[in-house]
Image (cartoon, helix red, strand yellow):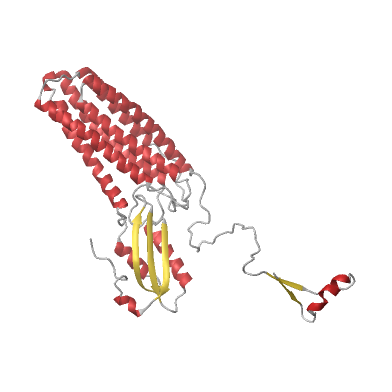
Amino acid sequence: MRLMMAAGVRGENIEHLKLRPEARPPTLLLFTEPSEPVPEESKPVEIPFHHCHRDPLPPLGLTPERLHARRQLYAACAVCFVFMAGEVVGGYLAHSLAIMTDAAHLLADVGSMMGSLFSLWLSTRPATRTMTFGWHRSETLGALASVVSLWMVTGILLYLAFVRLLHSDYHIEGGAMLLTASIAVCANLLMAFVLHQAGPPHSHGSRGAEYAPLEEGPEEPLPLGNTSVRAAFVHVLGDLLQSFGVLAASILIYFKPQYKAADPISTFLFSICALGSTAPTLRDVLRILMEGTPRNVGFEPVRDTLLSVPGVRATHELHLWALTLTYHVASAHLAIDSTADPEAVLAEASSRLYSRFGFSSCTLQVEQYQPEMAQCLRCREPPQA
């Protein structure tokens, strides 16, 4: 460190001044060399709204709305698991493949609701230096595992149904099948009732991580709890229709045992329905894992929104992808006029992307526009798929 003397005081008088208590010491200015920084305790500062973050401080824990959604999913998942185990036992005792197919569909429901519960828990975990985006994509991997497991179980049941149609040496216990199918209908009705209950009043907050499809250009982000419960409710309605079909087949076999072929035939029909119901999920999962543009966000609307910001001449390196169905991310380079204010352009562009498309994270690089950008190959827009 260096000591700079005030004007009028010679350096050789320092020791003399120290030996005279009655003499008033000169004013000393303390400067710190760059190699020796003075440690200062960092204090949290209040972040203004126009900063790069949307919210000053993300809320800790789950909101009341999400807590209610978690309770609903816990209850529905418990009911689904209990009755799935009951259907497996009942289908084995009744020698019914149709009952086992319905149990396989309930297995997919359990996996889906467990994925929603897992995503609710993950939404409270912060990002780390290793997982800089957090753990959101684990929900997508869980959905893929659920689909693959359903396909494997359904494939085995389809093979057994085909064998039964070729060889009629099997017997169906009509009573056990009818009882199990009736209980399955009641279970799906109970799950639909649990998931259809109204939650607490809607509240807006930090977007965080959300896990259900957004509509095109929402004004406010949709809450995770409502969308997760809504997706599970729609899935349960599909299972309810399948359970009614199994119940109809069991009634027919109970009163007309000679029509036992209704069991493998219904297995074929319901397996096709089960596999078809996984097609949208599999499409979304593959799109996310392949870093595709989010389903409800178009490349052209985002580009036009950025170009409409005052001062922006061109945009390039525009990338849109998603970590989950609703955790959408965008990054782009904005080429601006030399007279434009970079901070104002950045704030306006970020605000429009957040409000019009519901992005969870936006990274924008502002740079001066150069005429040669029009001929640059890397600055050109990607072609249509």
Circle count: 0
Q: 288 or 6, which is in the foreground?
A: 6
Image height of 35 relative to 94, above or below: below
Residue lying at 41% horizontally and 77% vertically, measured from the top left: 337
Image height of 365 relative to 375, above or below: above
Image quadrant containing the C terminus: bottom left
Residue 102, image x, y percentages: 25, 30
Residue 189, image x, y percentages: 31, 30
Residue 227, image x, y percentages: 37, 45
Image height of 139 relative to 264, above or below: below
Q: Quadrant of residue 228?
A: top left
Image quadrant containing the N terminus: bottom right
Residue 334, image x, y percentages: 39, 70
Q: Quadrant of residue 311?
A: bottom left
Q: 9 or 161, which is in the foreground?
A: 9
Residue 67 seen in render: yes
Residue lying at 40% horizontally and 50% vertically, measured from the top left: 222
Q: Quadrant of residue 199?
A: top left
Residue lying at 44% horizontally and 76% vertically, measured from the top left: 340
Q: 217 or 328, which is in the foreground?
A: 328
Q: Would residue 31 be found to the left or right of residue 162 on screen? A: right
Residue 234 seen in render: no
Q: 251 or 334, which is in the foreground?
A: 334
Residue sitting farthest toward the left: 166
